[in-house]
């Protein structure tokens, strides 16, 4: 099966439960394409948020995109509820998440659990706020790389970087390899 050019084997995720943590301002394509890849591979996705019933997606941080129904509030979930976590970008989304104590604690707990976490574009900002980057090798959108270095990460400019349970990617242009890599990464754990 193909999702926007990414070949995914159905059933590879065998019902794994994946949380996508997002707030208003998430980059729509960075939500839709990873979600589609997980579903195509047999996983189940829930949108977890600090927002109420819906989140407003954006296109390039400028134009409003679609609104997506929130499945669960981050204040009501635990790491044990999920097998993997995705942190999409957009500038506004992770900036809102990193200011929310429940979201930061959820990310911190998830990384500490050893379960796989995938973050793209500005998504690693929340990893920095959670204090989980010292000694880790990551990539991101260029404008937040100094923040990630200041949080103790080794930052590189590569399409996808895997360091233990963390998988990071640079921007929407890397979505095909990001989606393929996250399905493989989530299947191994």
Image: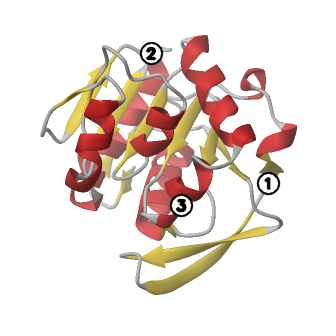
Q: Are marks 1 and 2 in contact (CB under 8 Å)?
A: no
Coloring scheme of the render? secondary structure
Whether residues under marks 3 and 2 lie with C-beta atoms below 8 angstroms apart, the answer is no
Distance from Cα at disc 1 to Cα at disc 3: 17 Å
Image x and y of residue 43, in percent: 60, 37
Residue lying at the far bottom in this picture: please name it.
Answer: 63
Tell me which numbered mark, 3 or 2, is placed earlier along the sequence.
3
Looking at the image, is 128 positioned above or below residue 174?
Answer: above
Q: Nearer the viewer, mark 1 or mark 2?
A: 1
Which-is-in-front pick, marks 3 and 2? 3
Q: Quadrant of residue 155?
A: top left
Residue 109 appears in the picture as rendered: yes
Element at label 1: loop
**At x 74% / y 54%, what residue is drawn?**
50
Query: Which one is nearer the viewer's eye here, 151 or 15?
Result: 151
Task: List x then y, in percent, for residue 101.
Answer: 71, 40
- Residue at mark 1 to residue at mark 2: CA–CA distance: 26 Å
CA separation, marks 3 and 2?
A: 28 Å
Question: Mark 1 — residue?
Answer: 71
* Callout 1 touching callout 3 (CB < 8 Å): no
* Rendering coords of residue 106 (x, y %): 68, 31
Label 2's element? helix
Looking at the image, residue 129 lies above or below residue 50: above
Q: Residue furthest front?
A: 150
- According to the picture, the residue beneath numbered tag 3 turns out to be 93
Question: Could you say which quadrant of the image residue 81 lies in?
Answer: top right
Which structural element holds mark 3?
helix
Residue visible at 43% across and 56% down?
Answer: 89
Asked if 27 appears above or below 82 in the picture, the reply is below
Q: Position of residue 182 (x, y in %)?
A: 39, 34
Of the two numbered discs 1 and 3 on the same chain, state the one appearing first in sequence: 1
Residue denoted by label 2? 188
């Amino acid at each position: 099966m193909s999702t926007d050019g990414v070949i995914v084997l159905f059933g590879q995720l065998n019902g794994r439960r994946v949380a996508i943590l997002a707030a208003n301002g998430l980059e729509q394509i960075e939500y839709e394409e990873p979600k589609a890849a997980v579903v195509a591979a047999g996983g189940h996705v829930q949108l977890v948020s600090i927002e109420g019933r819906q989140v407003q997606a954006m296109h390039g941080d400028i134009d409003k995109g679609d609104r997506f129904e929130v499945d669960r509030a981050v204040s009501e979930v635990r790491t044990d509820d999920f097998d993997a976590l995705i942190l999409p970008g957009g500038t506004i989304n992770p900036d809102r998440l990193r200011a929310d104590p429940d979201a930061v604690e959820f990310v911190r707990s998830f990384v500490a659990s050893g379960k796989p976490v995938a973050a793209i574009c500005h998504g690693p900002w929340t990893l920095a706020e959670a204090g989980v980057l010292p000694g880790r090798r990551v990539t991101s959108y260029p404008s937040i790389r100094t923040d990630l270095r200041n949080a103790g990460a080794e930052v590189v400019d590569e399409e996808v970087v895997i360091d233990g349970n963390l998988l990071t990617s640079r921007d929407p242009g890397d979505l095909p390899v990001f989606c393929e890599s996250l399905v493989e990464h989530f299947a191994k754990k």
